[in-house]
């Protein structure tokens, strides 16, 4: 017995513009999609429930191809500076938090971004020390490739003016050589992993529960997450996933396995399940553009003394890819700068996927060259891109890269036209989770910093259909689920969302930002109902 979903415009995502009148689901699968009358006649004895969709637009459930689910949940429960635009705003929020926390307890904030601050830069540890000398304080930059720590936190971590930067990281310093409080890339680990007290299983469950509910609110019925190496033993977050994600909370979690925990993970060999599965081995090759740690082939324009940070040498990277192949795994590698991307290509060419049909995932792929794109076409690689970066990185990225390099950076249209498969994600909590922010960025290519200005490099703009494919068929194909997810089609997963407007019919691309999810259905179950919407009473069984 199943449910007939009708009374809406159902975009199948099989072909551009293709719609059907109704979808019939049984359990967690779509049994049929087509004309309403034909489905009623064909399944007359099997329809035990009917849901009228209020003449609204219906799409397949969306999937975020790159996020950190537990980290997103943590951010929801922490100080969030991502919308703050001045030092005073940040200091006021910190002061209020400090007043409510007992001395000695850690205070962690998220999301500061010097490029949106009126002062044009972030203050250093001196300001944090003035706010509190009895609380260890850590503020994570929006990219999560840099943190700012106060003297109390640095002291607990054993970081002094005489400390040397670790391999793959930088301990920031002032002009006089004293530590500034800024720690970049692997230098963060000294505080984040080696010093801050470990979280509990209950902490992780609480964060994950918040994150999954937030995903459902934005029409995300699945996500590819990387968070198994940040909370001590990998088994702790694994336990949290299995406790939170159930038939009652049917979110499809595809989990990458960081190379730092891969050996222990393979020994334990947790089995894939329908809702929780384990994928490629995750590797970081470089840092971020905002922190000037993304590895470039030429120096940064605004900091000619550096071209970024290589997290691994070429030999080390080759060895990590080889290890993944020994375990029969694909790789998922963080590459933002063109030199990091080149090193990743070199490693894959030396150690190609171990099994036929496997394909590697290159994450971010922001700064490329025509040569690197051509090399990619010849290899079994898909790109895991974040269209929202075009909104958050412009226009300040001109100062770092210059227009010449930017002509082949953030080049989503060119990549698709070359036949390079792409999936779309948010990188939450680093960027907003809402997929329609990313879809708008892919189509309008506008900056959140200069919203009234025209889009940047509009020759790389995607159509609405291409942008939605990133979060439907693209995110399915990158994990070999292209035959069962991302479409409203017979045999596919019973995941669908109802929207307040038709994104394909909007004359003004900026109106994409007004898109709201009224209803989310995962595995055939209603998992989110927008308050005060058509479905706020649970369902509409009759035509309104």
Image (tube, helix red, strand yellow):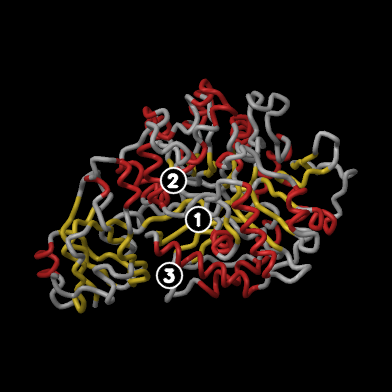
Comes first in the chain, label 1 or label 2: 1
Residue in view at x 63 percent, y 24 percent: 301
Identified at 69% across, 67% down, the residue is: 99
Q: Position of residue 409 (x, y in %)?
A: 50, 30
Res 143 visible: no
User: Does residue 43 appear to the left or right of 281 in the view shown?
Assistant: left
Cβ atoms under marks 1 and 2 closer than 8 Å: yes
Residue under circle 1?
A: 224
| Alpha carbon separation for disc pair 1 and 2 | 11 Å
Q: Which mark is residue 423?
A: 2
Q: Secondary structure at mark 2?
A: strand
Please determine whether, in this image, residue 258 is positioned above or below residue 170. Answer: below
Of residues 522 and 317, the one nearer the viewer is 522
Mark 3 neighbour density, 10 Å: few (under 14) some (14–19) many (20 or more) = many
Quadrant location, the C terminus? bottom left
Mark positioned earlier in the residue sequence (1 or 3)? 1
Does 69 sit left or right of 283 as displayed?
left
Query: Looking at the image, is 508 positioned above or below residue 370?
Result: below
Pick whichever of labels 3 and 2 is earlier in the sequence: 3
| Label annotation for residue 250 | 3
> CA separation, marks 1 and 3?
14 Å
301 vs 202, nearest the viewer: 301
**Which residue lies at the image location 45% right of the left edge and 67% below the top edge?**
213
Is the residue under label 3 in contact with that under label 1 (CB below 8 Å)? no
Label 2: few (<14), some or many (≥20) within 10 Å? many
Which type of secondary structure does the marked residue at label 1 adopt? strand
The Cα–Cα distance between marks 3 and 2, rounded to whole angstroms, is: 22 Å
Question: Is label 3 in a helix, a strand or a loop?
Answer: loop
């Amino acid at each position: 017995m199943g449910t007939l979903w009708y009374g809406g415009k159902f975009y199948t995502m099989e072909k551009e513009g293709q719609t059907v009148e109704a979808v019939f689901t049984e359990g967690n699968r779509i049994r049929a999609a087509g004309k309403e009358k034909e489905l009623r006649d064909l399944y007359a004895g099997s329809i035990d429930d009917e849901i009228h969709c209020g003449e609204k637009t219906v799409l397949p459930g969306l999937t975020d191809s790159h996020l950190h689910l537990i980290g997103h949940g943590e951010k929801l429960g922490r100080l969030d500076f991502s919308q703050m635009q001045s030092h005073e705003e940040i200091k006021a929020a910190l002061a209020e938090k400090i007043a409510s926390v007992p001395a000695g307890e850690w205070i962690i904030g998220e999301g500061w971004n010097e490029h949106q601050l009126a002062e044009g830069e972030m203050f250093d540890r001196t300001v944090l020390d003035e706010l509190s000398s009895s609380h260890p304080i850590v503020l994570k930059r929006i990219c999560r490739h840099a943190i700012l720590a106060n003297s109390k936190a640095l002291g607990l971590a054993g970081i002094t003016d005489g400390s040397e930067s670790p391999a793959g990281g930088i301990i920031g310093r002032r002009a006089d050589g004293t530590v500034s409080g800024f720690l970049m890339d692997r230098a963060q680990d000294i505080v984040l992993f080696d010093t801050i007290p470990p979280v509990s299983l209950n902490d992780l469950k609480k964060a994950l529960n918040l994150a999954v509910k937030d995903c459902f609110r934005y029409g995300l019925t699945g996500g590819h997450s990387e968070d198994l190496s940040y909370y001590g033993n990998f088994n702790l977050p694994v336990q949290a996933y299995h406790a939170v994600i159930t038939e009652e909370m049917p979110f499809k979690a595809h989990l990458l396995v960081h190379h730092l925990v891969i050996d222990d993970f393979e020994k334990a060999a947790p089995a894939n399940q329908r809702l929780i599965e384990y994928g490629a081995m995750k590797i970081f090759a470089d840092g971020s553009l905002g922190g000037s740690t993304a590895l470039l082939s030429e120096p940064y324009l605004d900091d000619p003394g550096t071209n970024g940070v290589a997290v691994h040498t070429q030999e080390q990277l080759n060895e990590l890819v080889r290890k993944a192949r020994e375990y029969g795994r694909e790789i998922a590698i963080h590459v933002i700068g063109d030199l990091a991307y080149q090193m990743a290509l070199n490693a894959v060419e030396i150690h190609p996927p171990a099994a036929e049909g496997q394909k590697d995932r290159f994450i971010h792929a922001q700064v490329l060259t025509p040569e690197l794109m051509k090399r990619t076409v010849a290899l079994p690689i898909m790109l895991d891109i974040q269209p929202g970066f075009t909104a958050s990185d412009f226009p300040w990225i001109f100062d770092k890269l210059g227009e010449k390099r930017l002509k082949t950076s953030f080049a989503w249209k060119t990549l698709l036209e070359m036949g390079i498969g792409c999936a779309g994600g948010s990188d939450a909590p680093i960027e907003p989770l809402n997929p329609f922010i990313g879809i708008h960025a892919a189509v309008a290519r506008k900056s959140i910093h200069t919203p009234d200005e025209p889009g940047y490099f509009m020759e790389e703009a995607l159509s609405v259909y291409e942008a939605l494919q990133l979060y439907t068929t693209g995110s399915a194909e990158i994990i070999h689920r292209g035959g069962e997810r991302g479409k409203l089609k017979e045999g596919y997963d019973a995941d669908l969302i109802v929207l307040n407007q038709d994104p394909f019919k909007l004359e003004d691309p900026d109106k994409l930002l007004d898109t709201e999810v009224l209803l989310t259905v995962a595995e055939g179950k209603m998992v989110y109902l927008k308050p005060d919407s058509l479905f706020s009473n649970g369902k509409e069984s009759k035509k309104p």
